[in-house]
Amino acid sequence: MELKWDVPVFRPWIPSKLPSLPLLLMLVLSLCLFSPTKCLDLDPDDKSSLLCFNSSVQDPNRSLATWVGSNCTNWTGISCENRTGRVVSVNLANMNLSGKVLPCLCNLSFLEYLNLSGNNFNGTIPTCFGSLASLKTIDLSHNSFSGVLPDNITRLGQLRELVLNGNRQLGGDLPWWIGNFSSNLEKLDLSSNSFNGEMPDSLFHLKSLRHLDLGDNYISGNVHEFYQSLEFLGLASNKLFGTLPCFSASTKSLTVLTLANNSLVGGIPTCIASLEALAHLNLSFNHLSYGISPRLVFPEKLLVLDLSFNDLSGPLPGKIAEATEKSGLVLLDLSHNRFSGKIPLKITELKSLQALFLSHNLLTGEIPARIGNLTYLQVVDLSHNSLSGSIPLDIVGCFQLLALILNNNNLSGEIQPELDALDSLKILDVSHNKISGEIPLTLAGLKSLEVVDLSSNNLSGTLNDAITKWLNLKYLSLARNKFSGNLPSWLFTFEAIQVIDFSGNKFSGFIPDGNFNISFRSNNGNSVRDPKVPFISVRSIEIKVSAMVIDTSELSFTFKVSSMVGIDLSDNLLRGEIPNVLFEVEGLEYLNLSYNYLDGQLPSLEKMWNLRALDLSHNSLSGQIPGNISTLKDLILLNLSYNSFSGSVPVNQGYRRFPGAFAGNPDLCVESSGEGCERGSPPAEPGKTFEEVEGPILVWVFCVSAFVSFYLGVVGLFCSARARSYILQTKV
Ligand SMILES: *[C@@H]1O[C@H](CO)[C@@H](O)[C@H](O)[C@H]1NC(C)=O
Ligand SMILES: *[C@@H]1O[C@H](CO)[C@@H](O)[C@H](O)[C@H]1NC(C)=O
Ligand SMILES: *[C@@H]1O[C@H](CO)[C@@H](O)[C@H](O)[C@H]1NC(C)=O
Ligand SMILES: *[C@@H]1O[C@H](CO)[C@@H](O)[C@H](O)[C@H]1NC(C)=O
Ligand SMILES: *[C@@H]1O[C@H](CO)[C@@H](O)[C@H](O)[C@H]1NC(C)=O
Ligand SMILES: *[C@@H]1O[C@H](CO)[C@@H](O)[C@H](O)[C@H]1NC(C)=O
Ligand SMILES: *[C@@H]1O[C@H](CO)[C@@H](O)[C@H](O)[C@H]1NC(C)=O
Ligand SMILES: *[C@@H]1O[C@H](CO)[C@@H](O)[C@H](O)[C@H]1NC(C)=O
Ligand SMILES: *[C@@H]1O[C@H](CO)[C@@H](O)[C@H](O)[C@H]1NC(C)=O
Ligand SMILES: *[C@@H]1O[C@H](CO)[C@@H](O)[C@H](O)[C@H]1NC(C)=O
Ligand SMILES: *[C@@H]1O[C@H](CO)[C@@H](O)[C@H](O)[C@H]1NC(C)=O
Ligand SMILES: *[C@@H]1O[C@H](CO)[C@@H](O)[C@H](O)[C@H]1NC(C)=O
């Protein structure tokens, strides 16, 4: 009998057009229902193979409880050939299964499709897979498989898709046969594993290959020319070197090319722009140098161009797309290079642009007013350049703007009242410029603001009530300006606040008491301590916006603010007593009130469990040092110097732990063990200052939006743990 199992899913492979399994089941089901001939039961041999496979699988969700009886349509994840009852497809993706894959799975000798993706299977990939001669698809991605790729797989001459990404323990030398064991192989995804060695020659010649992803491994060697027409080439995060080839065999087909995070050198060849189908080009985090040729003009299809973190120099490319006004470019990242000169006006003609990153270059001149023509723009980062002039009023044309990041430039002029039109704005950072004037009252309209950094400018005036309307505020810094007047009574009423920094101004009067609505508790579980960067200077604050391309049509922005949780009112003209409630704020990690004229006594600090830095130096505080300082285990900085404290400090209770913390308090004496108080004031060596001390870093991640509605009509919201870890891994 001639066996024929022409289930649609196994028709010639078309990328990303495989019908989903439910559809397939429906199909098989309806075939059974309406077919005059009786559907055959699940083949008994295959049934016992499956039950044997099940016996070593942990299934906490009991997804496989349906594996009873002999009706194939009943068996979750299994499809059978409709006449013979032989199992042709096993799709157990994303079922939270774990355990070892037993070799009895290989007794399913008619299997064509195997998908165990997104589970927690471990152990090695069974060598017997080589005997599943009909296999066309293997997807074992996102599991915990370990070891090497078994040689027996070379026997799978029919294989079209081999997808093994996301198994960190899977690796070894990239096998020499990987490029020529199946002349049908169209998709090979070994990304996010631990493969090393060089790419074998066969890989560059395999005619059928369309999709090759070897990203995030330890692959070395030169980047070669590929001789087949690829559609997707992912080689990011490896150890590749050499110069960039032209990929000329893929001129008509290559849509995604990412070589980010390698060690490529040399210039960007203009031939890259003749890749007609290119939608994503990511060459960031390499050592590419020289200027960008004016002839490097991309097709209109290009959606994403990321050349950040290289050594590129010369003027910014003006003409990025052939017909600028038709360009679909949504993300342009040229940051962290050495581009100089002005921002070309042509950039403001890239109408689809949603994210523009030009930070950390040597750009001069003014921000072009025409930037306001970019009405889809959501993120602008022009920070760390030498831009001058004022913030153009026309920027209100970018009415969807989420983040306006212009810090560390030479911008001057005033903050215009009309900026209130940017009512989606979540991040406003114009710190370290020469901006003067007052905060306009109209800015009360910026109700979405979460992060505001106006520090290190020439801003002045008293604080008006505009700020009270920013109810979602998490971070507010007005430090190092010329603000004056009393601190407003609403200062401590923002419910989500993490940082208030008003240091280095001329605020006077009392620290407001009462109205304490805040607790600096971690925000909604969105804050994580990054174990890789455990320490950061207390004052150091970093705001990072990353855009991530999820697939060809979705862009997601992640905003990350790294900072300690705290209040800094140091270096002002504040007087009077410190309100006791300030010592009772939950979750506070630092409190700096130094260099003021504060007086009165300190309460006990027993509620400040999280305190890591406390600086009250250079005030007129008096009375006893609170007895329980030694119980604050996390405290790494204490400075009470240059006050009028009196009484005694027990040696074993902080004096040794914080040398210098008590200097300049003439009436204070140090109590050595058992012998009472030793007269003579503590040494005059001053305590550490805030800048010198390193504290833990709070990496605070929040996703803001994902939006690409004009391209495919897809609006996606994406804020998954995976997106976060990607950002943490690559752009920190
Ligand atoms: C089995 O499926 C194929 C195609 O899917 C169909 O042509 C054939 O008629 C079916 N056989 C039976 C017995 O239902
Ligand atoms: C798998 O096949 C082998 C022989 O090919 C047989 O010995 C073994 O019992 C089978 N296992 C199951 C679970 O069917
Ligand atoms: C699968 O195996 C588990 C034990 O590992 C068992 O409890 C369960 O009944 C088995 N399922 C079937 C359908 O046999
Ligand atoms: C399994 O199949 C039988 C027919 O063979 C059917 O009566 C039963 O409802 C099915 N069970 C489930 C859970 O679908
Ligand atoms: C198999 O089960 C499905 C429902 O799950 C039912 O519609 C179908 O009739 C059953 N087939 C046989 C042969 O019992
Ligand atoms: C495996 O299943 C997952 C989840 O359904 C799906 O996203 C993936 O595309 C499948 N893999 C293959 C190669 O079809
Ligand atoms: C497993 O079951 C739990 C609830 O019982 C559910 O929240 C979870 O989404 C399920 N996981 C999978 C992979 O189906
Ligand atoms: C997966 O199963 C484990 C138990 O083995 C359970 O703790 C976990 O919550 C499950 N995850 C999901 C997504 O269902
Ligand atoms: C697989 O995981 C189980 C626990 O889930 C563990 O006992 C076993 O040692 C693991 N096997 C391997 C090879 O890592
Ligand atoms: C797999 O290959 C090894 C040698 O590489 C061999 O010893 C073993 O028998 C093979 N197993 C199968 C199932 O083909
Ligand atoms: C694969 O390539 C190697 C050399 O690269 C060659 O020796 C071998 O014969 C090739 N195998 C097939 C099946 O083409
Ligand atoms: C862009 O802005 C300028 C002035 O800012 C204006 O003259 C021009 O018409 C605008 N172009 C488009 C296409 O909107």
Image (tube, rainbow, N blue to C red):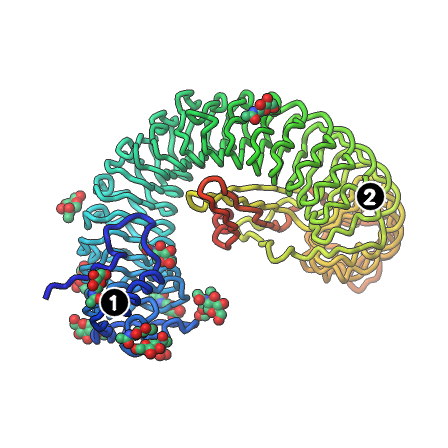
Kindly identify which residue carries mark 2.
618
Q: In terms of depth relative to the viewer, which is nearer, 686 or 256?
A: 256
Residue 125 place in picture, x, y as percent:
28, 61
Mark 2 or mark 1, earlier in chain = 1
SS for dot 2: loop
At 72% from the left edge and 49% from the top edge, which residue is drawn? Answer: 471
Residue 248 sits above or below residue 38 on the image? above
Residue situated in front as seen by the camera: 221 or 664:
221
Q: Which quarter of the rendering shows the N terminus?
A: bottom left
Q: Is residue 348 above or below residue 89?
A: above
Whole-percent x and y of residue 296? 40, 24
**Secondary element at tag 1:** strand
Which label sits in the foreground, 2 or 1? 1
Query: In the displayed structure, would residue 336 be above or below residue 25?
Result: above
Q: Which x, y percent locates residue 420?
A: 71, 36
Residue under label 1, please give it: 80
